[in-house]
Image: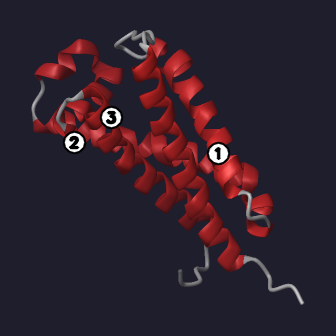
Amino acid sequence: MPRTRHPVVSAILWGGLIAGTVDIGAAALITGLGPLMVLKLIAGGLFGKAAMAGGLSVAVLGLLLQWAMSVVIAAIFVLAMRRRLARLASWPLWGAAYGVAVFVVMNYVVLPLSALHASPHFGVAGFIANLVAMLLFGWIVAFVARIFLASSAPVQT
């Protein structure tokens, strides 16, 4: 990865955008819905069930909301962990822990407070699939942060 003048900003933006995009695909696989419907569900966080009847503009709004949330989630991780990740190879552990935290917050705080008022009701397989998706999200954010932050760390002699 090339050096950048703003490694923290790069880690936040790239980590959030990549993880957020992969998360849309994971949600489509888990739910069996197409990506456009997943994006409408995300927009449903603002508009409720009416978003399901929306068109492409609602799906685009869902994509922008997904990316915005993902960048904020990545920013929290990167800002909290930037010094530790720049020196340690333990990014998989920190990414997994963060993925579990994101899983809990999204399912038990964000979704119930959204306009969809969704409460989690998982079977065992659904719980595992959603948890794995958030572990992947956390690992992506941590890996991208590790790359950018390690490239900006001073060389130790």
- Quick one: label 1, few (<14), some, or many (20+) residues within 10 Å? few
Kindly identify which residue carries mark 2.
Answer: 60
Mark 3 residue type: Ala
| Residue at the extreme bottom of the image, as rendered | 157
The label nearer to you, 1 versus 3, is 3
- Quick one: label 3, few (<14), some, or many (20+) residues within 10 Å? some
Q: Position of residue 41 (x, y in %)?
A: 27, 25
Tell me the residue at 58%/25% (across/down): 105
Left or right: 119 as drawn, with respect to 10: left
| Residue 7 seen in this snapshot | no
The alpha-carbon separation of the residues under discs 2 and 1 comes to: 24 Å
Mark 1 residue type: Ile
Indicate whether 155 appears above or below 66. Answer: below
Q: Secondary structure at mark 2?
A: helix
Q: Position of residue 19 (x, y in %)?
A: 44, 50
The alpha-carbon separation of the residues under discs 1 and 3 comes to: 22 Å
Q: Secondary structure at mark 3?
A: helix
Question: 28 or 41, which is in the foreground?
Answer: 28
Kindly identify which residue carries mark 1.
Answer: 76
Kindly identify which residue carries mark 3.
Answer: 27
The alpha-carbon separation of the residues under discs 3 and 2 comes to: 16 Å
Which image quadrant for residue 62? top left
Ranked by sequence position, the earlier of labels 3 and 2 is 3
| Residue at the extreme right of the image, as rendered | 157
Q: Tell whether label 1 touches label 2 (CB within 8 Å).
A: no
Which image quadrant for residue 116? top left
